[in-house]
């Protein structure tokens, strides 16, 4: 699997993104479960639409994949995920996203398909934070006590564990959460948790 | 989360400028300037309410809710600039969220039933951004039968309008000067019923919240027999549908039962 990990939206490495998109499968799973804390469905739809519009110029055939439809149905999700060349995971609350990944089994599926080189995992903000070994420190930015799902009432502190460090998006950026990210940097240093700060526009690419 | 109630039984207003995340402060300055430019001498005060006002705004999804209170009432035509200005701010600050600009005269705010919810929002979760503080002219918010009546007294009429929208008989209802799709009214219905649910409980004990999940939890704890319907509403609140017929059937079945409960607790009790 290849990775295009952005701080905010698609970021500034769009030429590289074009190269990373599998040429023979532009079907894209757009995952927005990091927004499941919100009960403003209208705003959510607008926000998702804005993301999807940004992805379309890359020739991506975007489909909204709601992990809630796959809770307790890992095998079904595995089959569905196999259809996509790109998995794009957007921002929101990383603790909520982590719960949705756990309940649907996406966390395990991602690890299982790590060796496939014809899949691109892309995303931004919470969508990239969640790949860390731990979500410790992220509570300074996102509320860890949000439990929108009936079958998960405890905070999941373990990250998906695909990266061996935490990405801290919106670092020193013109973003509402940048101040809190500064505090998180201090926390990570103090607690010796490996991290890489990313400014909005910046992208980490792993091939 | 339930709102805090003080020792006098009033809902505590926890909003303050000090809680606003620094990024939003420059935006608030711009909103301040916008209202001043557009309303001039007619402007009395500007309030900020909702998640921004308590420092809990989430970028990209939260609303930046502002209310300008004017000395004199303005006509619909005089306020159409709001639609354009909201979009312009949204484009200028795409990371912030969505801009909800409201203009209302003091007279309307104090007396019009159209603003019964706004009166409560202002008293329970807002702070003065600039101008004259008029909150003392609005009644304190004490959860109880009177507040339930004030907020949900027109529930039968509202549900009837919604039924007519889903039946296709009303097609021109607007919100903030714009016609809205069925999905919007589906969400609207979920908010009306879930919040009226806490209103029914409020008539018995002092509880108050705007949060739909809290309203659901409080109501279904008291009336578990309606869990299925309230669960459906909660689900539609985050995943609305556009199937008018399906919503109509639901509302047509549920409204009489719910209104009976409303009658018993808020009207007769």
Image: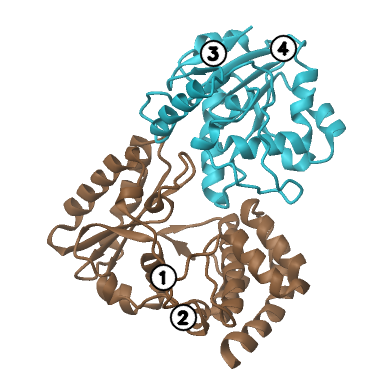
Q: CA distance from mark 4 to mark 1?
A: 56 Å
The numbered mark 1 sits on a residue in which chain? Answer: B
Residue A24 circle label: 4
Against A61, residue B158 (above or below) is: below
Q: Nearer the viewer, residue B169 or B267?
A: B267
Dot 4 falls on a residue whose secondary structure is loop
Q: Please tell me which residue is depicted at 54% across the width and 13% down the height of the picture.
A: A204
Quarter of the picture holding the N terminus of chain B: bottom right
The colour with which the image depicts chain B is brown
Quarter location, residue A136: top right
The quadrant in which residue B228 appears is bottom right
Q: Is residue B124 above or below residue B31?
A: below
Q: How crowded is the residue under tag 4: few (<14 C-alpha within 10 Å), some, or many (20+)? A: few
Camera-side residue of B200 and B158: B200
Frontmost of labels 4 and 2 is: 2
Marks 4, 2 in one chain: no
Q: What residue sits 72% from the left and 80% below the top?
A: B257
Q: Which residue does the numbered mark 2 point to in the structure image?
A: B150
Residue A204, numbered label: 3
* Marks 4/2: CA–CA distance: 60 Å
Question: Marks 2 and 1: in contact by CB < 8 Å?
Answer: yes
């Amino acid at each position: 699997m290849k990775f295009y990990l952005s701080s905010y939206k698609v970021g500034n490495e769009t030429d590289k993104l074009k190269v990373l998109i599998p040429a023979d499968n532009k079907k894209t799973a757009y995952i927005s479960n990091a927004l499941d804390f919100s009960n403003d469905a209208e705003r959510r739809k607008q926000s998702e639409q804005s993301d999807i519009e940004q992805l379309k110029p890359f020739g991506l055939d975007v489909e909204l994949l709601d992990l809630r439809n796959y809770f307790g149905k890992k095998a079904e999700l595995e089959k569905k995920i196999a259809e996509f060349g790109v998995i794009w995971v957007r921002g929101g609350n990383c603790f909520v996203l982590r719960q949705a990944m756990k309940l649907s089994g996406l966390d395990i599926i991602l690890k299982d398909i790590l060796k496939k080189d014809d899949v691109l995992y892309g995303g931004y903000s919470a969508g990239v934070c969640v790949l860390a070994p731990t979500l410790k420190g992220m509570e300074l930015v996102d509320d860890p006590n949000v439990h929108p799902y009936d079958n998960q009432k405890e905070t999941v502190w373990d990250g998906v564990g695909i990266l061996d460090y935490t990405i801290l998006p919106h670092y020193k950026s013109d973003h509402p959460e940048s101040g809190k990210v500064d505090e998180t940097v201090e926390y990570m240093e103090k607690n010796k948790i490996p991290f890489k700060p990313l400014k909005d526009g910046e992208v980490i690419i792993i091939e | 989360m339930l709102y805090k109630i003080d020792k006098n039984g009033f809902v505590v207003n926890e909003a303050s400028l000090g809680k606003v995340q620094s990024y939003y402060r420059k935006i608030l300055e711009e909103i301040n300037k916008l209202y001043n430019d557009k309303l001039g001498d007619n402007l009395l005060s500007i309030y900020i309410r909702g998640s921004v006002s308590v420092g809990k705004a989430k970028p990209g999804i939260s609303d930046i809710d502002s209310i300008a209170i004017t000395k004199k009432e303005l006509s619909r035509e005089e306020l159409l600039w709001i639609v354009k200005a909201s979009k312009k701010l949204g484009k200028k600050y795409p990371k912030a969220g969505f801009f909800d600009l409201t203009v209302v005269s003091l007279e309307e705010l104090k007396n019009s039933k159209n603003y019964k919810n706004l009166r409560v929002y202002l008293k329970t979760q807002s702070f003065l951004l600039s101008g004259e503080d008029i909150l003392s002219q609005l009644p304190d918010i004490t959860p109880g039968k009177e507040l339930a009546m004030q907020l949900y007294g027109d529930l039968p009429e509202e549900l009837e309008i919604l039924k007519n929208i889903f039946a296709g008989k009303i097609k021109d209802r607007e919100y903030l000067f714009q016609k809205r799709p069925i999905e919007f009214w589906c969400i609207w219905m979920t908010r009306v019923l879930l919040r009226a649910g806490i209103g029914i409980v409020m008539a018995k004990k002092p509880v108050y919240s705007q949060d739909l999940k809290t309203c659901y939890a409080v109501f279904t704890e008291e009336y578990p027999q309606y869990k299925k319907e309230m669960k459906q509403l909660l689900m539609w609140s985050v995943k609305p549908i556009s199937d008018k017929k399906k919503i109509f059937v639901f509302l047509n079945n549920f409204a009489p039962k719910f209104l009976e409960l409303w009658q018993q607790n808020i009207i007769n009790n």
